[in-house]
């Protein structure tokens, strides 16, 4: 089993900060981040759905858009929003 390194683009970190600050359930946001990191470490291309050439993964209360770089075994999270689920 090959694992991937998950990184967060600065814009995604800024959006995550905004989502966490605005949330009335900050622990749920923190738990979602941990689940996203764990999920994307293994077979990230099979997670989520195609999203205009990138991937979209919803782990309530967050949704992230990310790209997979197979050659480097990295995943970069590009943006974060509060999910509507």
Image: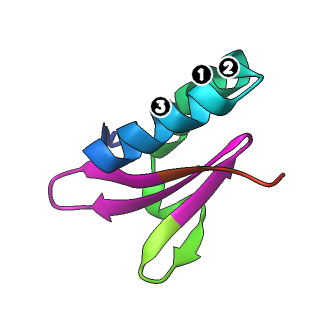
* Secondary-structure class at tag 3: helix
Real-space Cα separation, disc 2 to disc 3, in angstroms: 10 Å
Q: Is residue 32 visible?
A: no
Q: Which mark is residue 71?
A: none
Q: Are marks 1 and 3 in contact (CB under 8 Å)?
A: no
- Which residue range is magenta in the image? 56-79
Using the image as rendered, state which of residue 23 and residue 85 is in the foreground: 23
In terms of sequence position, does the residue under pointer 1 or pointer 3 come before the other?
Answer: 3
Find the residue positioned furthest to the top: 27
Spot occupied by residue 51 in the image (x, y as percentages of width and height): 53, 77
Q: Which residue is tagged 1?
A: 30
Check the image and name the residue furthest to the right: 85
Which quarter of the rendering shows the N terminus?
top left
Q: Position of residue 31 (x, y in %)?
A: 64, 22
Task: Name the outermost residue toward the left.
Answer: 72
Q: Is residue 65 magenta?
A: yes
Q: Residue furthest bottom?
A: 52
Question: Residue at 76% across / 22% down in the picture?
Answer: 25
Mark 1 or mark 2, whichever is nearer to me: 2
Residue at coordinates 54% horizontally, 26% vertically from top-left? 34
Q: Are marks 1 and 2 in contact (CB under 8 Å)?
A: yes
Name the mark nearer the viewer: 1 or 3: 3
Q: Secondary structure at mark 1?
A: helix
Above or below 75: residue 30: above
Q: Earlier in the sequence, mark 2 or mark 3?
A: 3
The residue carrying mark 3 is 17
Quarter residue 10 falls in: top left
Q: Position of residue 85 (x, y in %)?
A: 84, 51
Determine the residue positioned at 23% across, 50% down.
73
**Residue with the mark numbered 2:** 26
Please tell me which residue lies in front, 54 or 18: 18
């Amino acid at each position: 089993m090959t694992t991937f390194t998950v990184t967060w683009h600065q814009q995604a970190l800024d959006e995550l900060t905004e989502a966490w600050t605005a949330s009335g359930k900050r622990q749920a946001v923190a738990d979602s981040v941990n689940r996203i990191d764990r999920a994307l470490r293994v077979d990230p291309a099979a997670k989520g759905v195609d999203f205009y050439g990138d991937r979209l993964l919803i782990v309530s209360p967050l949704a992230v858009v990310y790209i997979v770089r197979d050659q480097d075994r990295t995943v970069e999270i590009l943006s974060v929003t509060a999910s509507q689920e």
